[in-house]
Image: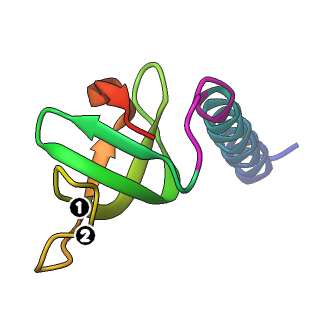
C-alpha cells in the first residue's frame, strides 16, 4: 500500500463515519420528538402551527419546527409570518 492509497482509505473511512454519525443524530432527534406536523405549539415568543420538522444537530440532537405564526385565537396573523421554534423552547402543545 502506498502513502496515497493509505490517505484515500483514511478519507473514505472519515466520510463513512460522518455519514453514520449524522444518521444516528437524526434518528435520535426523531425518536425523541413528541410533536408532529399540524400540531400547534407555544414557546416564549408566541404560537405556531407546525408545517415542517427538521433535525437540528446539537448535542444532544433535537427537532426544529417551522410554521405559521398564530394569534392567541389560533388564527394566522395578518402578515402570515413564518418562523421556527426549537424543541427545547416548546412550553406546551396547545392543540
Q: How many marks?
A: 2
- For label 2, the crowd category at 10 Å Cα-Cα, with few meaning under 14, some 14 to 19 and many 20 or more, is some
Q: Which residue is mark 1?
A: 69
The secondary structure that dominates the magenta segment is loop
- Residue at the limit of the structure toward the front, as seen here: 73
Write the residue at 23% across / 59% down.
70
Q: Is residue 30 magenta?
A: yes
Query: How far from the left and from the top, in percent, is residue 14?
Result: 66, 39
Q: Which residue is mark 2?
A: 76
Q: Is residue 23 magenta?
A: no
- Which region of the structure is painted magenta? 29-36
Name the one closer to the observer, 67 or 14: 67
The image shows residue 53, relative to residue 25, as above or below, that is below
Q: Secondary structure at mark 2?
A: loop
- Which mark sits nearer the N-terminus, 2 or 1? 1
Query: How far from the left and from the top, in percent, is residue 77?
Result: 16, 70
Write the residue at 58% across / 30% down.
33
Write the residue at 88% across / 43% down.
1
Indicate the quadrant containing the C terminus: top left, top right, bottom left or bottom right. top left
Name the one closer to the observer, 52 or 21: 52
Name the one closer to the observer, 66 or 22: 66
Q: Secondary structure at mark 1?
A: strand
Using residue 90 as the reference point, say whether residue 19 is left or right of it: right
Query: How far from the left and from the top, in percent, is residue 60?
Result: 46, 19
- Residue at the limit of the structure toward the top, as seen here: 60
- For label 1, the crowd category at 10 Å Cα-Cα, with few meaning under 14, some 14 to 19 and many 20 or more, is many
User: Label 2 vs label 1: CA separation?
Assistant: 6 Å
- Disc 2 to disc 1: CB gap under 8 Å: yes
Amino acid at each position: 500500500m502506498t502513502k496515497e492509497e493509505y490517505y484515500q482509505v483514511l478519507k473514505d473511512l472519515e466520510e463513512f463515519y460522518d455519514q453514520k454519525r449524522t444518521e444516528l443524530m437524526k434518528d435520535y432527534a426523531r425518536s425523541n420528538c413528541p410533536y408532529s406536523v399540524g400540531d400547534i405549539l407555544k414557546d416564549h415568543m408566541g404560537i405556531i402551527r407546525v408545517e415542517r420538522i427538521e433535525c437540528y444537530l446539537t448535542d444532544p440532537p433535537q427537532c426544529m419546527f417551522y410554521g405559521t405564526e398564530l394569534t392567541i385565537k389560533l388564527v394566522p396573523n395578518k402578515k402570515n409570518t413564518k418562523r421556527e421554534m426549537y424543541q427545547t423552547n416548546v412550553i406546551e402543545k396547545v392543540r
